[in-house]
Image (spheres, grey):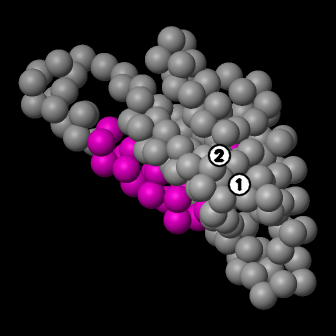
Amino acid sequence: MDKSIVLNGVKSLLFLLFSGSCLLQDLKKKSISERTFRLFALPGALLRLYELSLLWNTEGDKEALKNGIICFILPALLIIISYLTMEAIGRGDGLYFLVSALYLSPGENFCLFIFAAAFAALAGLSVIAFGKAEKKRLPFMAFVFPKALQLGLKGIMAVLSGRNMI
């Protein structure tokens, strides 16, 4: 089996474990521990570097490097917005997308954010519309996880079918 196919499977599995762990913590504690981010950021960074080394000196090396940089624009913006709004938008959300950028393509990470933001906005509007908005906190990971699950399973299914998704 091709190294890049195995790499994709490992990345997908770790991404699913990361997303599930974040969901459980967000639902239970209303926050995600920094330790979780560090625990999954390290293997994600190593896998991303290994992926770049596989593509180095090939036709896809410049594209891979460009994607590697583009992946971090959205999380950086979320962390800056969190800082500027005194965490009205949680810093954990930005950190989640930062770690996710190590496992996903820029398009997948952006799609994950748009999906989650759209459904969180709809849920927030419905809470307001039905008059239940007394400082209610909606766990953002509950809106992130369905799309994260779909992306992770897509990667695992690609590996099982022997297709390369890098």
Instruction: Using the rendered image of the protein, determine whether residue 151 is visible from the camera's viewpoint.
Output: yes
Q: Is 109 within the magenta?
A: yes
Distance (Cα) linking label 2 and label 1? 6 Å
Check contact, mark 2 vs mark 1: CB within 8 A. yes
Instruction: Using the rendered image of the protein, determine whether residue 89 is visible from the camera's viewpoint.
Output: no
The chief SS type of the magenta part is helix
Rate crowding at label 2 as few (under 14), some (14 to 19) or many (20 or more) other CA atoms within 10 Å: many
Q: Is 53 within the magenta?
A: no
Q: Which residue is mark 2?
A: 12
Check disc 2 and report its element: helix, strand or loop: helix
Check disc 1 and report its element: helix, strand or loop: helix
Most distant residue in the left direction: 130
Snapshot quadrant of residue 39: top right
Residue 139, x across and y down, in percent:
42, 26
Type of residue at label 1? Answer: Asn
Q: Which residues are magenta?
A: 99-120
Q: Which residue is mark 1?
A: 8
Q: Who is closer to the viewer here, 118 or 79? A: 118
Residue 91, x across and y down, in percent:
59, 37
Residue 146, x across and y down, in percent:
41, 38
